[in-house]
Image (cartoon, coloured by chain):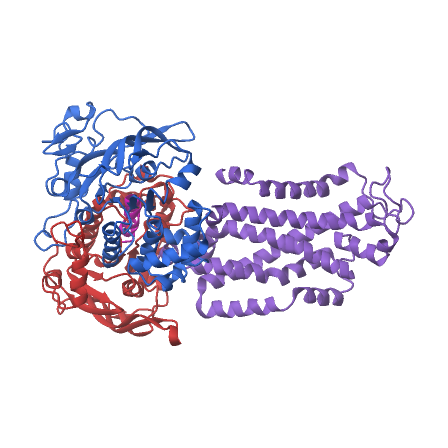
Amino acid sequence: MPSEPSPLADQPLKFEAKNLSRSFGHGKKLVEAVKNVSFGIASRDIISIVGQSGCGKTVLAKMLLRLETPSSGTLSFNGKPIGNERDAREHWRSVQAVFQDPFSAFNQFFTIRSQLKSSFKLFKRKPEEEEMEARVDAALMAVNIKPKEVEGKYPFELSGGQMQRMLLARIFILRPQVLIADEPTSMVDACSRANILDYLMKLKQELDMTIVFVTHDIGLACYISDSIFIMHEGEIVEQGPPAQVTGSPSSAVTRQLLDDIPDVHRPWIKRGALD
Amino acid sequence: MKLFTSLLRTPSFVLGFGLFFATLLFALLGPLFVHVDVSTRVGLAFTPPSRAHWLGTDHLGVDMVSLLIAGLRSSLYVGFLAGTVATFVGTLIGLYGGYKGGLIDDVLTVGTNLFLVIPSLIVLILLSSSIENGRSLTLIALIIGCTTWTWSARAVRAQSSSLRGRDHVSLARINGYGTLGIVLLHIMPYLLSYIFMVFILQTATGILSEASISMLGLGPYDSISLGKILNEAIRNEALTDGAWWAFAPAMVLITVIVFALYIINTSLEGVFNPRLRK
Amino acid sequence: MSSPIFEVDNLRAHYLTRFGQKIQAVDGVSFSLKAGEILGIAGESGCGKTTLVSACMGLYIPPLHLSSGDVRIEGKSIIGMNVEQNRRDILGRKISMIPQGALNSLNPTRKVKDLATDMILSHDETADKRQVHARLRERFRKLGMPADDVLNSYPVQLPAGMKQRVVIGISTLLDPRVVIADEPTSALDVSTQKAVIRLLFELMDQGIIGSMLFITHELPLLRHVSNNIAVMYAGEIVEMGTIEQVIFDPRMPYTQALMGSMLSADSGHRDQKPVSIEGAPPNLAHPIQGCRFAERCPVARPDCKENQQVIRIVKDRQVRCQYAE
């Protein structure tokens, strides 16, 4: 469960953004997906970026992943500006991701195993064939899947929960410093959701990973985060530890987000005539 | 397998494939049953069909059946070669531009559009007439391929650009795949059925283009093609002589092949694209 | 009290695979709905929820087949007619389904109003296009949607929440007595979800639709949406009762496990650690003799796997567990 908020001062920042913006199109059709945001993400923290669809959280995550280039502002990783490395793979060795829809995240023309094995492309020196096999097996075991279960299987032959764990198995192989998790639970059954969150905690605790968790569900974010960023229309409108954000929200957006989650213990919406 | 059975249940595919297969058999196996000889005069000019020569003779007295088989073989050869070239060039440019986006895509699109507005038939005519002596069948096919690829480039680019934002492409990128690897392993497989359809259409276009320029008298110097048969028939006034057998069968053959390829294409679209299946 | 408008009576449906295998995807499901009632159906993916939808609509398209049972709307059976007849007389008029993300699978080059007209015309060939448009406009206004804007746009121009509301507006245009909502909000963010649920309530309260079957794997949502809840597992209803009974006092171990896996945003309950249910639902291609949940059940006893489980009444609700109390 969320640990004490880590003091930013005495820990090196993994990511640091200053006046970061990203816009698409130009003229009348200009869309500012991310507007002038500044933040720091401390090492070994779990940060959640929470907001409705279209609030810019996915674009922000893609910038951290170096899949989108900022329009203005600076974004640095471990003190060095992102995008200056000669080889982009350098960045991806340290920063990796799991995506929302595990089915569309894998190529349906290759077996799961071969795709997991292709992760070794990122390594500076590719391990021996046997070692690669052993490490894939170990990663599968880490997400509680018997290697035999997926032997020779293609993505469409597995269930959603299993596929999401395959994306996580990739992370256990690559062991990056930072994991960007973009809505990893939204396509998963409610009853396996806790499972995915457990794996994220495990990655943090066992492999010292920094995790950026992107979600529209503030309730979910509370469970695992050390700090929460609330995003709305491209801006970070509130940030702080979960207890503070949910306990005494300072922005109307946060209150709305909290209000909109259906929870069994709280009133949500009532039906007019029948009640 | 499932795809194949559902194709066999599509009447238009069966018709198109049947027709195309029949013309292919006629071209490939014809020489085994009929003695093909396009250089010997076997009778007088424009002899009407008879038992010895089923479709009569042309203006020189050469057996029409022999001419048709030879012409069909060259037309199919030109079609496949031109189709392959056009699909290959167009697919490469389309895949690359669509995936890369941004400036590279803009430059490639403008380039493609420039090629597209140049009427390819006129380029063909100019090129063909300027290389009078070396106008071989293969050269003509290559010229056709090099002027018709624009269409496939545009079609493939649109598809490739729609795939570029997909999660599996992002995953491939952060997995360290380079542009070539992503385009060939993570985008092209998703478009194979589409590219196959493009190939079929480009083949049909190739056959038609060859027939057009040959009919205008700019056909290959070294072989007979269906378009060239039509050209010879017109030049030697088969029409005014009432010698229908000198041009009608060639016309029918061209129409049948192109028609068959077109309906194969539409029926494949119905099977590959589930949205149209309903 | 009024008589039920939707009755499902011991419904069983199976798939026949190409290799002659029989998969009993829906097994002995019974419930009834009165006017104004919403029944929530909860379960994991693969529990037979989606098959239940087709089975309830009387839509048996091979490989899905009816094994036995009956479905009645306002007392009349809708089972046993061919698909054409069902499409013409039953679907849309008597019973209608709200699918998830439906507008994404439709032809993107046509305007919303044309898509809607196509759908209506497929049920009623004699309908006049202009009348349908007028009716759509009137209905959308009545439901508080910007009718002209929405109807004249293309699906891609609408945000996800509006798309789903449009789908709902279209599928209830012929005032169906029963509506089946299959995960209508699972692809939406929490705020949009709320707007969609409001719309469904509006439809019920205005009497446009009679009663509703609401299918989702989100228990917190069901708690606010439905009157009663049926929990489905491996093709069977394993527990059915009111919200109070099923959500706050579950008796069947499976329902208890589902509740335990739930996350709560409420400050008072946030510290309870959610627990996932390990394992996967059984393969229905092989007949199962005993309790279907026994493999994963934390409190299973040896004879659970042998005894066939029947519905018992425990504390006023139906439970399919011999040891529940």
Q: Is residue B149 visible?
A: yes
Between A166 and A90, the residue placed more toward the observer is A166
Between B158 and B11, the residue placed more toward the observer is B11
**On screen, residue C69 above or below B237:** above
**Total numbered labels placed on residues in the image:** 0
Tell me residue B60's x, y (percent).
Answer: 88, 51
**On screen, residue B23 above or below B183:** above
Q: What color was chain C assigned in the picture?
A: blue
Quadrant of the image for the N terminus of chain C?
top left
Q: Which residues are magenta?
A: A160-177
Question: Is residue C247 found inside the magenta-colored segment of the image?
Answer: no
Kindly give the residue lying farthest to the left in the view shown. C268
Q: Main secondary structure of the magenta part?
A: helix
Tell me residue B46's x, y (percent).
Answer: 88, 49
**On screen, residue A26 above or below B198:** below
Q: Which chain is red?
A: A
Seen in the image, is B152 located left or right of residue B161? right
Kindly give the residue lying farthest to the right in the view shown. B44
Between A79 and A229, the residue placed more toward the observer is A229
Q: Which chain is purple?
A: B
Quadrant of the image for the C terminus of chain C?
top left
Question: Is residue A171 found inside the magenta-colored segment of the image?
Answer: yes
Seen in the image, is C240 located left or right of residue B274? left
